[in-house]
Amino acid sequence: MSENCTHNCSTCGESCGSRTAEQTSFLEPLNPASSVKKVIGVVSGKGGVGKSLVTAMMAVKMNSKGKHTAILDADITGPSIPKAFGLNNNMVMMTKDNLMIPATSALGIDIMSANLLLDNDTDPVIWRGPVIAGAVKQFWNETLWEDVDYMFVDMPPGTGDVPLTVFQSLPVNGIIIVTSPQELVSMIVAKAVKMAQKMNIPILGLVENMSYLECPDCGKKISVFGESHIDEIAKEYNIPVLAKLPIDPKVAEHVDNGTIEYLERDWFDLAAEKAMEL
Ligand SMILES: Nc1ncnc2c1ncn2[C@@H]1O[C@H](COP(=O)(O)OP(=O)(O)OP(=O)(O)O)[C@@H](O)[C@H]1O
């Protein structure tokens, strides 16, 4: 029970043992033609730390394990998933029941993103929060998600209104928190952990991106953005570090060429194991 408990459950979202009222569920049901077994959200404190990269590479990893994998790009105003997979705008068809058919990557990952719906991928999406959250819900319940084993959701950065709505609307089974060493990591992780706890969603672990740069000549690891504190933070919150990714020029090359599926790296072995345990 919260120490501030007023014994009025209708004003409180905690699912404590003393709860007497039913908790309101904001979960959006899937359409009857769709099936998604596990949903994993990928979150970050701010933009540009590699959340989309982690989403894409995790999807590729699970796909390579024979799991039918999908990506829901909930980063509506900054959608970078289609480009990494070499997919363009205007790629979404409709079923006769008016469901959107996701685009499919070269190796069979189903993808839904705002950029796939635009006439021109340089068109900005100038929408306010509630409209953005509404679009994410539509991507979830008005898309034909056929027999999906794992869906990865590239969340909008931060812990604001839109990510919160997404967490409440989709049955998220676990989250991966992506950080970079130069961020205020401790605060960002604390916020993400608290949000996940409030939603009762397990945290798979932390991924530190751009952790170091490996010298191509001597192999020495250089901490470009300063020393990492990710291990201490992980210990503090009792969550595992799933991976520490280097700054790798091949990443940028594959993202730019739309060939992320063909980037061979073993960075996500542990994260995939955790996902299989869900
Ligand atoms: N480890 C890395 N090595 C090299 N380039 C990287 C690495 N991680 C990410 N990048 C590049 O940095 C840019 C930002 O990455 P990404 O789009 O994944 O971040 P993001 O957190 O999803 O950002 P946003 O929320 O703004 O969409 C991309 O161009 C990506 O190719």
Image (cartoon, rainbow, N blue to C red):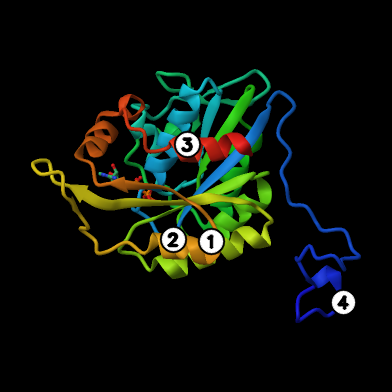
Q: What separation in Å lies between label 2 and label 3 (alpha carbons)? A: 21 Å
Cβ atoms under marks 4 and 1 closer than 8 Å? no
Q: Earlier in the sequence, mark 2 or mark 4?
A: 4
Above or below, comparing residue 11 to residue 278 in the picture: below
Q: Point out residue 140 in the picture as x, y percentages from the top left corner.
A: 62, 37
Residue that carries the numbered disc 3 in the rendered image: 113
Residue 45 tag number:
2
Evaluate whether residue 109 shows in this view: no
Above or below, comparing residue 142 to residue 218 in the picture: above
Residue closer to the observer: 243 or 172? 243
The reply to whether the residue tagged 4 has its Cβ within 8 angstroms of ligand 1 is no
Q: Secondary structure at mark 3?
A: loop
Please, what is the three-letter code of the amino acid marked with disc 3?
Ser
Within 10 Å of disc 2 (Cα), the crowding (few <14, some 14-19, many 20+) is many
Front position among marks 1 and 3: 1
Residue that carries the numbered disc 4 in the rendered image: 7
Please, what is the three-letter code of the amino acid marked with disc 2?
Gly
Above or below, comparing residue 27 to residue 87 in the picture: below
Q: Earlier in the sequence, mark 2 or mark 3?
A: 2
Q: Point out residue 167 in the picture as x, y percentages from the top left corner.
A: 62, 52
